[in-house]
Image: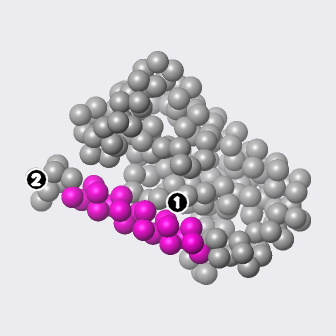
Amino acid sequence: MTFVRFFLTWWGLVILGALDTSLFVFIPLGTDAAVIYLCARNRELFWLYPLLITAGSIAGAVVTYLVGGKIGDEGLSRFVSRRRLERLRERMKTIGALTTGLSAMLPPPFPLTAFVLTSGALRVPLTRFIVVFATARLVRFGTEALLARRFGTSLLRMLESEAAQRIAIGLVIVSVVGTAIAIMRVWRSPTVQSRG
């Protein structure tokens, strides 16, 4: 698939990172799979791929953070369920930076976008947010890169197997459906309709 191959380039990796932390795009495990595959395939560049995807992740997260700041605490309910929103607010108020760091480090189904939006809405200082977020992403992707470098041959064999290809196609379908649902939910929100 040419579409998927694009994300396995340097620029594609940066864009994938940005899309993964954006408000509308849903890419379960896409960033992790890309980093692992690229590091296993090009072991001498294992240090570069975590930097590229982290740079993209920061760009996407800053945009999402700014959207959170613009919609404010009241507007969060358009994007996050009330029950989850209350838990997020509580966690952000009690352990703020640690919560952001953990959300940036943990894989799906951990609600990364919700944490980034909440950070913006609750006015977590942008510099602190970026430092914590970037550090956590580098730890996550750096760990994956080291493991991929160490176990590259067996990982490549597994990732290039027919079963892995089917799983990848399934994840692409889930991504497309999840993205469409996210866009429709925002589009149908009362605030967007009242502006239209």
Residue 150 horizontal side relative to residue 103, left or right: right
Residue 139 horizontal side relative to residue 3, left or right: right
Image location (x, y in percent) of residue 173 = 50, 72
Residue bearing mark 1: 27
Extent of the magenta region: 169-188
The correct choice, above or below, for 12 with respect to 140 in the image is below
In this orientation, does residue 151 appear?
A: yes
In this orientation, does residue 124 appear?
A: no
At 46% from the left edge and 25% from the top edge, which residue is drawn? Answer: 91
SS for tag 2?
A: helix
Q: Quadrant of residue 29?
A: bottom right
Image location (x, y in percent) of residue 106 = 61, 42
The crowding category of the residue bearing disc 1, from other C-alpha atoms within 10 Å (few below 14, some 14 to 19, many at least 20), is many
Q: Which mark is residue 159?
A: none
- Give, as a three-letter code, the residue at label 2: Ser
- Nearest the viewer among 115 and 3 is 115
- Give, as a three-letter code, the residue at label 1: Ile
Image location (x, y in percent) of residue 112 = 49, 43
At 67% from the left edge and 62% from the top edge, which residue is drawn? Answer: 34
Q: Residue furthest front?
A: 83
At 27% from the left edge and 45% from the top edge, which residue is drawn? Answer: 78
Quadrant placement of the N terminus = bottom right
Magenta stretch: dominant secondary structure: helix
At 27% from the left edge and 40% from the top edge, which residue is drawn? Answer: 77
Image location (x, y in percent) of residue 73 = 28, 32
Quadrant placement of the C terminus = bottom left
- Nearest the viewer among 90 and 63 is 90
Whether residue 172 appears in magenta in the rendering, the answer is: yes
Q: Are marks 1 and 2 in contact (CB under 8 Å)?
A: no
Residue bearing mark 2: 194
